[in-house]
């Protein structure tokens, strides 16, 4: 019986989420034992033709070529999983969505007329149906292994939807907002990092995107009680996951 075929695709991104797969080390050997890594340019030039049972897609759609290519990848993929903030929420490059992309092109490139780019950076789900979104900047390799295993075994992935606050409680970390009056996005951010920043007495930056049913406006009211201005709230919400709907809508509220 042939093994399921896995493909890993890159769009506009820093490659960090693909590197998370390579960082799995010992676990990667188990993955290779269970599936054929059929297409993964970051790791090997060897390529097996599609269709593919599972495709992992990193990066956002930023060019007309990207928009056409993701359609073809969707057709080749039985299951399509987006990995990382760029693929699930447009990434840090989605900050262009609140500006004029032509201004950036004229500043960065000597000959912007040679470029063919879109006005916006958008997540993969804005263009094709996605079977599962794995968040993070970068993703958790533990969660990645769980998701790959789940889809190979045809079961639902066991990835938490609760907030970083739960992780702080589990590791015995005091709430930085309560104990130290430090602004923190932990109450509205999905768990997955192990609450690293609060463990070092710093507020959460929202790397894993919105948690399930986040009340971002209520958190904003708490930040304001700490002396945080609306402009700072907008900047806090417009980072790695700025185009996630919950963060996008709340930042627009504070920008008005």
Image: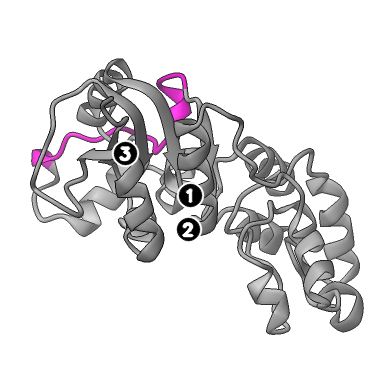
Mark yes or no: residue 178 visible: yes
Direction from residue 127 to residue 233 in the image, left or right = right
Q: Which is in the foreground here, disc 3 or disc 1?
A: 3
Residue at point 49%, 43% (across, down): 98
Question: Percent position (x, y) of residue 44?
Answer: 13, 51
Locate the C terminus by quadrant: top right
Identify whether 27 is placed above or below 114: below
Which of pointers 2 and 3 lies earlier in the amino acid sequence? Answer: 3
Q: Which numbered circle lies on residue 35?
A: 3
Q: Which numbered circle lies on residue 124?
A: none
- Give the magenta part as a residue range: 113-129
Taking depth in this image into account, of 103 and 7 the one nearest to the observer is 7
Q: Which numbered circle lies on residue 141?
A: 2
Q: Is mark 3 on a helix, strand or loop?
A: loop
Residue at point 26%, 27% (across, down): 2
Kindly report the secondary structure that dominates the magenta region of the rendered protein.
loop
Residue 249 falls inside the magenta stretch: no
Q: What element carries label 1?
A: helix
**Badge 3: few (under 14), some or many (20 or more) residues near its Cα, within 10 Å?**
some
Question: Which of the 4 image quarters holds residue 234?
Answer: bottom right
Tag 3 and tag 1, C-beta contact below 8 Å: no
Question: Percent position (x, y) of residue 94?
Answer: 44, 45
Taking depth in this image into account, of 114 and 28 the one nearest to the observer is 28
Q: Which residue lies furthest to the top in this view?
A: 75
Tag 2 and tag 3, C-beta contact below 8 Å: no
Direction from residue 185 to residue 50 in the image, left or right = left
Work out how far the residue at label 2 is from the one at label 3, CA to CA, in angstroms. 17 Å
Identify whether 133 is placed above or below 235: above
**Badge 1: few (under 14), some or many (20 or more) residues near its Cα, within 10 Å?**
many
Question: Percent position (x, y) of residue 178?
Answer: 91, 75
């Amino acid at each position: 019986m042939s093994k399921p075929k896995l493909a890993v695709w890159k769009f506009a991104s820093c490659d960090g989420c693909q590197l998370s797969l390579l960082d799995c080390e010992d676990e990667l050997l188990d993955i290779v034992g269970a599936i054929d890594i059929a297409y993964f340019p970051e790791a090997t030039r060897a390529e097996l033709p599609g269709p593919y049972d599972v495709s992992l897609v990193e990066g956002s759609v930023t060019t007309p070529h990207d928009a056409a290519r993701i359609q073809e990848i969707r057709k080749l993929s039985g299951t399509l999983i987006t990995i990382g903030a760029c693929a699930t929420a447009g990434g840090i490059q989605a900050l262009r969505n609140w500006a004029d992309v032509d201004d950036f092109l004229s500043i960065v490139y000597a000959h912007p007329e040679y470029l063919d780019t879109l006005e916006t950076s958008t997540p993969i789900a804005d263009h094709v149906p996605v079977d599962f979104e794995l968040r993070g900047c970068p993703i958790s390799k533990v969660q990645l292994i769980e998701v790959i295993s789940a889809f190979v075994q045809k079961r639902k992935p066991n990835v938490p939807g609760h907030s970083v606050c739960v992780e702080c409680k589990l590791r015995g970390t005091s709430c930085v907002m309560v104990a130290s009056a430090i602004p923190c996005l932990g109450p509205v951010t999905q768990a997955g990092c192990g609450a690293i920043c609060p463990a070092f007495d710093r507020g959460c930056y929202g790397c894993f995107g919105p948690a399930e049913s986040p009340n971002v406006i209520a958190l904003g009211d708490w930040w304001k009680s700490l002396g945080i201005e609306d402009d700072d709230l907008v900047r806090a919400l417009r980072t790695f996951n700025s185009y996630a709907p919950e963060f996008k809508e709340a930042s627009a509220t504070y920008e008005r």
